[in-house]
Image (cartoon, helix red, strand yellow):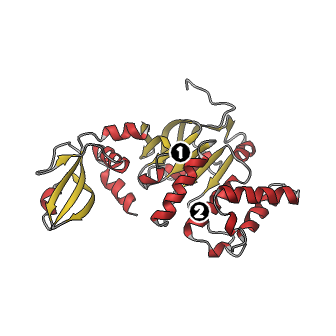
């Protein structure tokens, strides 16, 4: 690689392959360089996202290739990597009978923070950073879904890691909680590396400046959200269709993205793999990131996989 991130907050992935027993290839020559900020990892189910994240977090060994976190090799320097990294898995539901502050206090004891006063200061500091200081005495089982995810971030941040790895953070959250979580992650990404894996494209939010799209174990796109949206130019269309006549618009190769009622009609937006406008449709001046993602997958003949993941 031309640029070295050694000694900096970073993730470097070089030629990583992962082949599971039985011959299933989960990752096939992945190369990524990730620096400070929010980095989005997109891709349909089975693309290899979770496998890559588990390798980065030292939970799984690659079949070949090298991964470094802040310059430390994930296979040769696991303890050092774990000191640098915080991990929020997709499922974070333990500690149900504990109070919120007890969860972090226990983690502080496990981490070797013996000074009770200092540990208490750190507990309140972290809870405040994720907006949970006011519910420090509440039992975990009484938290909303959004609060539980924020507690998950708090436990990942407790040891002040330089890198935060977050897996599918907003699954099951309502729109308001999802927005709060996006704002939290965008703020945290100003001073550390955040690798966020998701199938909900909107979760990346305006704080994301760089992303990669995985498909069948390979990086098929790497760049900014704006670059991905440029790929969708001339491939996203909109039409006003009388209710009940959508089937004529949604011909093979046209994949609906959204629809909304408008009088006795429907305003339908769709992506088209071949770029040919459906009858009565007009090209959209500016595609959304979700539409750009679906358009890119449609160009690869993989839009069904992306749609299935988005609906799950």
Furthest residue in direction right, as rendered? 115
Whether residue 285 sits left or right of residue 125 in the image: it is left
Q: Residue at x 24, y 53 (%)?
A: 270
User: Whole-percent x and y of residue 142?
Assistant: 63, 76
Crowd tier of the residue under label 1, counting other residues whose Cα lies within 10 Å: few below 14, some 14–19, many 20 or above: many
Q: Is residue 5 above or below residue 119?
A: above
Label 2, residues with CA under 10 Å away: few <14, some 14-19, many ≥20? many
Q: Which residue is mark 1?
A: 18
**In front of the other: 279 or 299:** 279
Disc 2 versus disc 1: distance between alpha carbons?
A: 29 Å
Measuring from the top left, give residue 28's x and y in whole percent: 47, 41
Lateral position of residue 283 relative to residue 257, left or right: left
Q: Quadrant for residue 193, please give it.
A: top right
Mark 2 highlights which residue? 149
Can you see residue 21? no
**x then y, percent, for residue 221:** 41, 38
């Amino acid at each position: 690689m031309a640029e070295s991130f050694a000694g900096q907050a970073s993730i470097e992935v070089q030629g990583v392959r992962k082949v599971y027993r039985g011959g299933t290839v989960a990752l096939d020559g992945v190369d990524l360089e990730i620096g400070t900020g929010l980095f989005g990892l997109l891709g349909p189910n089975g693309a290899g996202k979770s496998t890559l994240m588990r390798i980065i977090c030292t939970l799984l060994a690659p079949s070949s290739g090298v991964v470094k976190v802040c310059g430390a090799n994930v296979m040769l320097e696991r303890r050092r990597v774990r000191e640098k990294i915080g991990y929020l898995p997709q499922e974070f539901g333990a500690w149900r009978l504990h109070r919120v502050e007890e969860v972090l206090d226990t983690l502080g004891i496990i981490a070797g923070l013996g000074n009770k006063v200092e540990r208490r200061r750190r507990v309140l500091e972290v809870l405040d950073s994720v907006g949970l200081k006011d519910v420090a005495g509440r039992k975990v089982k009484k938290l909303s879904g959004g609060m539980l995810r924020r507690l998950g971030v708090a436990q990942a941040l407790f040891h002040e890691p330089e890198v935060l790895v977050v897996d599918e953070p907003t699954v099951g959250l309502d729109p308001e909680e999802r927005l709060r979580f996006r704002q939290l992650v965008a703020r945290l990404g100003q001073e550390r590396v955040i690798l966020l894996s998701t199938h909900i494209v909107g979760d990346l939010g305006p704080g994301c400046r760089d992303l990669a799209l995985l498909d069948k174990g390979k990086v098929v796109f790497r760049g900014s959200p704006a670059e991905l949206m440029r790929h969708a130019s001339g491939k996203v269309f909109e039409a006003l269709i009388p209710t009940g006549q959508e089937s004529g618009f949604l011909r093979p190769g046209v994949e609906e993205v959204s629809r909304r009622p408008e009088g006795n009609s429907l305003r339908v937006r769709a992506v088209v793999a071949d770029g040919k406008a459906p009858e009565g449709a007009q090209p959209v001046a500016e595609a959304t990131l979700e539409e750009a993602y679906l358009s890119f997958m449609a160009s690869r003949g993989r839009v069904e996989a992306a749609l299935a993941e988005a609906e799950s």
